[in-house]
Image (cartoon, rainbow, N blue to C red):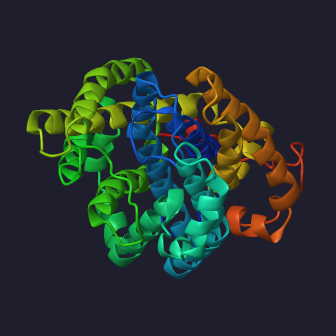
Amino acid sequence: MPNATSPDTTRYHAFDALRGAMMLLGIVIHSGVAYCTIPDTWWLKDITTSRGMDLFLLFLHTFRLPAFFVMSGFFAALLLSRRGWQGFLENRAARLGLPFLLGSLVMFPFLKISSVYCHFLTRDPQPWQRTLAWIAQGRLEKSIEPMHLWFLETLMLVCLAAAWLGPRLTRLLSRPWFLQLMRPAAGIPCLSLITFATYLPMSHGFLDTPQDFAPHFRVVLAYAVYFAFGWGLYCHRSALHRISQTPLSSLLVAAVLMVPTSVAIIGQMSDLSTRHWPAFLATAAGSALIAWLVIFALIAWFLRRFSQPSPWARYLSDSAYWLYLFHPPVLVALQIPMFGLDWPVAVKFLLGILLATPILLGSYDLLVRDTWIGVILNGRRYPRGLAAAEPAASTPSTAALPADA
């Protein structure tokens, strides 16, 4: 087993890239939710929607944040090995708590006002006047919500639970039994069964999205399973070759399973007045299995392709936090001019991504990377530009690490 007494100074390039990719997928999801048929999923709902967009977004939703929480658990254990429990909690407070507070204060007024404006745009000949009247009634401050930043609150609660459990968590997950979970043939079905159990308290059998600041412990528990698995991966980081053997055909299996799972989800959404147990259980089982199939395949693929240092991958990994935190105002500002235009859904969806991404990357390089904001988000200031993205000395590849004795 790895030596737990000396700090780990390895740079895990593959997992850096995977964590960043899952955050960047948030831009893809939020560029599409304005055009899906599922209600109450974004700040505005275009008059042109698509069932195909439903299927695509539901598939991304099943694995994106679960995969991110697996990586969060891995890097949380790494952080603990470097800084101890006090340093771990101080770092989490700074890197999660401050962005949560500052992001809520900066973004919510713009997003909520934009949402109200789009609501009146199709219902009133004077949408701006109605929006200003809504603000004048004092309803803005009464409607505050965590927005897309709810995941930071959830992650903070999971980290607090990990801190409370202390060394017991590491001892439990360091035992040899965990190695069996790292083999796809055993890990995917076992972990899917555990996740299935955590999805049963959800509203529709798949991961709920909190709409307020109150702790939603069913959501915390579900994501804690993914976080704990990532923590265990760090405890057995020299055995990552077990997961790297996952066949990429698992992605195809997951995509096929998404069709009946989506049918079950949409069937539930069509009648919210009662619980449709067959569809609910099919949703929970399908969502859990899809999540772990994709997570294992993604880990395998990133270990194979991104274990060596790359300037552009490192830069995107560094920028991903900023891009995810502040993409909603940019997307909404781009979606409002397209609101109601008789364009294909695919065109609006792709335009949102293609226009928002360079704006966000430019703002990261100009306003964040070498500033105090970069210290909060990235842990330190980095010189601007791609050439400076890669540190002078690279670290061993995760894929090249030896197996456990």
**Front position in the image: 342 or 58:** 342
In the image, taking residue 124 as reference, residue 205 lies left or right, namely left
Where residue 59 appears, as percent x and y from the top left, is 40, 31
Q: Residue at x 47, y 59 (%)?
A: 151
Q: Vertically, is 84 above or below 9?
A: below
Q: Vertically, is 250 above or below 141?
A: above
Q: Residue at x 39, y 66 (%)?
A: 158
> Which residue of the protein is positioned furthest toward the bottom in this rendering?
86
Q: Quarter of the image for the C terminus: give it.
A: top left
In the image, taking residue 75 as reference, residue 325 lies left or right, namely right
Q: Vertically, is 84 above or below 269?
A: below
Total marks in image: 0
**Front position in the image: 365 or 339:** 339
The answer to whether residue 239 is visible is yes
> Which residue of the protein is positioned furthest toward the left in this rendering?
277
In the image, taking residue 402 as reference, residue 55 lies left or right, namely left
Q: Residue at x 89, y 53 (%)?
A: 384
Where residue 98 appears, as percent x and y from the top left, is 62, 74
**Front position in the image: 136 or 233:** 136
In the image, taking residue 210 as reference, residue 343 lies left or right, namely right
Where residue 245 appears, as percent x and y from the top left, is 43, 26
Q: Quarter of the image for the N terminus: give it.
A: bottom left
The answer to whether residue 82 is visible is no
Where residue 170 appears, as percent x and y from the top left, is 37, 65
Q: Residue at x 67, y 34 (%)?
A: 338
